[in-house]
């Protein structure tokens, strides 16, 4: 069984429609793919078995923007929620809040670029995003269009990181509270790419200990942003804390270079997640 438990569609900052995402999953011989868009369930919540290719199973989820309040500076972290109830009111309200803040923040960032002479406008970025949850990759695309960057990665390196004068903060959920909310909605939480240093600061292991005590379900171990040392250390920590270990591509279509299925989740980890979850069922495809 090949299982990829973290991908993005064009309902957030990926470039594939959910249908294209599922086709790509079939093409790369996946049996299970999770659709985990940032702060939204719009990509998977309306999927029925007849929409999913036969032989493929879709796991519904989302990647929540969170903050870990450590003893020194707060650290931005990403928390996957898998198989939670998409209609759970508290969690839905949290997603709505996160999305509203993303729009305000993107508007401010675009205004700063425009003030410095970049020929871009919020209307144009919003049109590119369409009904997607807007993220920095949409602004990166605009920077490429106006010639300020040679590619999305270049746009992030030059203008979109936290140290940049164009960077604006957005609302984030307290990660301990988010773990509780996902659990209350019947879902399983997984700490996404905990050692991904290239995205910014990472948390110390004691934060993961606190997250486990709050009900964290698993940690993403196999991820392109983790080296072999990270993976080994995370596996040991997960075993100590009784956490499930997962792997994924964190696929973003052509907004990133990583192919779907680049890293995968062991079947026993997937089974443990399905067993622990009660908010939603995986969707097994019936479309011939
Ligand atoms: P945001 O959610 O708006 O803060 O944007 C963060 C998203 O941008 C993350 O989910 C990443 O997928 C994406 N991202 C971060 N760094 C890069 C990069 N260097 N190249 C492409 N995408 C990136
Ligand atoms: Zn993303
Ligand atoms: Fe992430
Ligand atoms: Fe992601």
Image: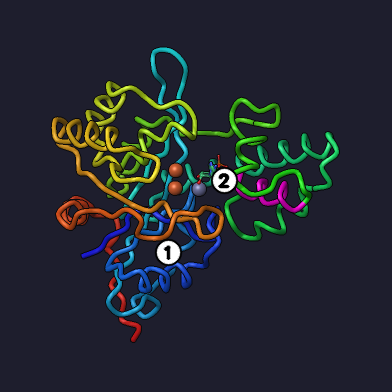
- Which residue was labeled with disc 2? 99
Asked whether, in this view, residue 231 is left or right of residue 197, the answer is left
In the rendering, at what x and y percent does residue 270 appear? 21, 55
In the rendering, at what x and y percent does residue 105 appear? 66, 37
Furthest toward the bottom, the residue is 288
Q: Is residue 65 above or below residue 163?
A: below
Asked whether, in this view, residue 43 is left or right of residue 279, the answer is right
How far, Cα to Cα, is label 1 from label 2? 17 Å
Asked whether, in this view, residue 206 is left or right of residue 159, the answer is left
Looking at the image, tell me whether mark 1 or mark 2 is earlier in sequence order.
Answer: 1
Q: Is residue 22 above or below residue 14?
A: below
Q: Quadrant of the N terminus?
A: bottom left
Confirm whether the magenta stretch covers residue 13: no
Looking at the rendering, the stretch of residues picked out in magenta corresponds to 136-145
Confirm whether the magenta stretch covers residue 140: yes
x 61%, y 25%: residue = 163
Is residue 183 visible in the rendered image? The answer is: no
In the rendering, at what x and y percent does residue 151 appear? 64, 49
Q: Main secondary structure of the magenta part?
A: helix
x 59%, y 32%: residue = 161
- Which residue was labeled with disc 1? 44
Around disc 2, counting alpha carbons within 10 Å, would you say few (fewer than 14), some (14 to 19), or many (20 or more)?
A: many
Which residue is at the front of the view, 211 or 7? 7
Identify the colour scheme used: rainbow
Which residue is at the front of the view, 251 or 49? 251
In the rendering, at what x and y percent does residue 34 appear? 35, 59
């Amino acid at each position: 069984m090949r299982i990829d438990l973290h991908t993005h569609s064009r309902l957030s900052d990926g470039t594939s429609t959910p249908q294209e995402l599922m086709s790509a999953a079939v093409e790369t011989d996946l049996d299970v793919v999770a659709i985990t868009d940032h702060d939204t369930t719009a990509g998977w919540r309306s999927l029925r078995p007849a929409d999913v290719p036969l032989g493929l199973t879709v796991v519904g989820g989302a990647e929540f923007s969170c903050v870990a309040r450590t003893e020194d500076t707060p650290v931005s972290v990403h928390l996957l929620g898998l198989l939670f109830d998409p209609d759970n009111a508290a969690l839905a309200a949290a997603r709505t809040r996160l999305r509203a803040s993303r729009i305000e923040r993107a508007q401010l960032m675009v205004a700063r670029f425009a003030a410095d002479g970049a020929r871009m406008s919020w209307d144009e970025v919003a049109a590119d995003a369409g009904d997607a949850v807007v993220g920095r990759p949409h602004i990166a695309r605009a920077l490429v269009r106006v010639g300020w960057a040679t590619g999305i990665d270049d746009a992030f390196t030059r203008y979109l990181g936290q140290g940049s004068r164009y960077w604006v903060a957005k609302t984030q959920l307290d990660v301990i509270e988010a773990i509780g909310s996902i659990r209350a909605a019947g879902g399983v939480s997984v700490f996404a790419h905990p050692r991904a240093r290239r995205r910014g600061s990472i948390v110390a292991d004691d934060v993961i200990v606190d997250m486990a005590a709050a009900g964290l379900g698993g940690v993403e171990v196999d991820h392109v942003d983790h080296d072999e040392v990270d993976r080994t250390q995370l596996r040991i920590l997960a075993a100590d804390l009784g956490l499930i270990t997962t792997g994924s591509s964190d696929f973003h279509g052509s907004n990133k270079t990583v192919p779907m299925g680049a890293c995968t989740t062991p079947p026993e980890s997937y089974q443990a997640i399905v067993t622990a979850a009660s908010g939603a069922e995986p969707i097994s495809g019936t479309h011939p």
